[in-house]
Image (cartoon, rainbow, N blue to C red):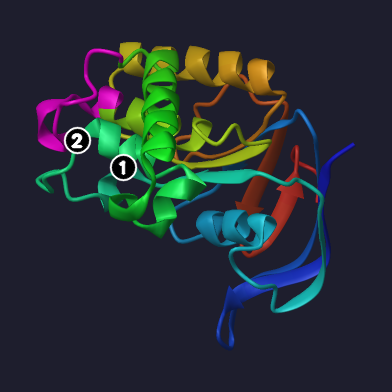
């Protein structure tokens, strides 16, 4: 079974430690919520789990092989002239080399995989739209499609329900549940409002301490 384990871990930036003595286990198939107030270290913990942020001290075990990250939608400039198709295609490793030099066979495969990912999130007809031409919920689904295109085994989602109406939140919830089941994919969800009612595990951050399902 694939797992993420932290033991006696400390996380922070430079000499500033935000979280200390962290002990936790995330199993394959978990839907894990990370909750806590602003500035508590939710994103710090999540990046440490995936190995994007190096531990200040302690032990980390990570056996997943295809991680994906869905950043906060608010970090994007919605006036930037890029289409949803181009955004989703960035999730393919092949795209990282510069799509201008990818062979025609790869371009075709990229296009097929991009269209498939857009279809899975209900955006088949929106691929040519620019960022500012779609709703907040549609843009969030495009970010999820960018993660799904590589068929990951674990996805970290940073506040995927922020600034989205009730219907949009329900659509994203159903989408995440369906794709998690299809891919047997573990989900790690950061949510400030603590409104994720379908998670199987909860990591609550309080005063620099991480509690699992309410137990330190």
Mark 1 and 2 residues: CB-CB less than 8 Å, in contact? no
Residue 213 in the image: above or below residue 71: above
Query: Is residue 25 placed above or below 61 in the rendered structure?
Result: above
| Image-quadrant location for residue 208 | bottom right
As helix, strand or loop, the secondary structure at mark 2 comes to loop
Which residue position holds label 1? 73
Q: Which dot marks residue 83?
A: 2
- Name the foreground residue: 143 vs 127: 127
83 or 47, which lies in front? 83
Instruction: Left or right? Give the position of 176 relative to 79.
Output: right
Residue sitting at x 40%, y 48%: 95
N-term mark: 1 or 2:
1
Who is closer to the viewer here, 210 or 172?
172
Residue 158, visible in the rendered structure: yes
Q: Position of residue 181 (x, y in %)?
A: 67, 16
Q: Closer to the observer: label 1 or label 2?
A: 2
Magenta stretch: includes residue 175: no
For the magenta stretch, what is the residue range? 124-138
Q: How many marks?
A: 2
Please tell me whether residue 133 belongs to the stretch shown in magenta: yes
Where residue 8 sits in the image (x, y, percent)? 84, 68
């Amino acid at each position: 079974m694939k797992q993420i384990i932290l033991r006696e871990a400390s996380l922070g930036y430079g000499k500033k430690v935000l979280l200390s003595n962290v002990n936790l286990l995330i199993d394959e198939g978990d839907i894990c919520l990370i909750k806590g107030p602003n500035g508590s270290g939710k994103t710090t913990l999540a990046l440490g789990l995936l190995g994007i942020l190096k531990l200040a001290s302690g032990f980390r075990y990570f056996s997943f092989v295809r991680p994906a990250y869905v950043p906060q939608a608010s970090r994007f400039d919605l006036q930037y002239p890029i289409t949803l198709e181009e955004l989703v295609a960035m999730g393919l490793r092949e795209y990282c080399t510069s799509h201008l030099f990818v062979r025609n066979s790869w371009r075709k495969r990229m296009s097929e995989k991009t269209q498939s990912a857009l279809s899975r999130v209900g955006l088949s007809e929106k691929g040519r739209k620019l960022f500012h031409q779609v709703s907040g919920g549609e843009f969030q689904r495009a970010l999820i499609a960018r993660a799904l295109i590589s068929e990951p085994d674990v996805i970290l989602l940073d506040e995927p329900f922020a600034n989205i109406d009730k219907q949009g939140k329900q659509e994203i919830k159903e989408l995440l549940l369906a794709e998690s089941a299809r891919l047997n994919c573990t989900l790690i969800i950061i949510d400030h409002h603590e409104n994720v009612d379908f998670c199987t595990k909860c990591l609550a951050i309080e005063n620099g301490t991480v509690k699992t399902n309410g137990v330190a």
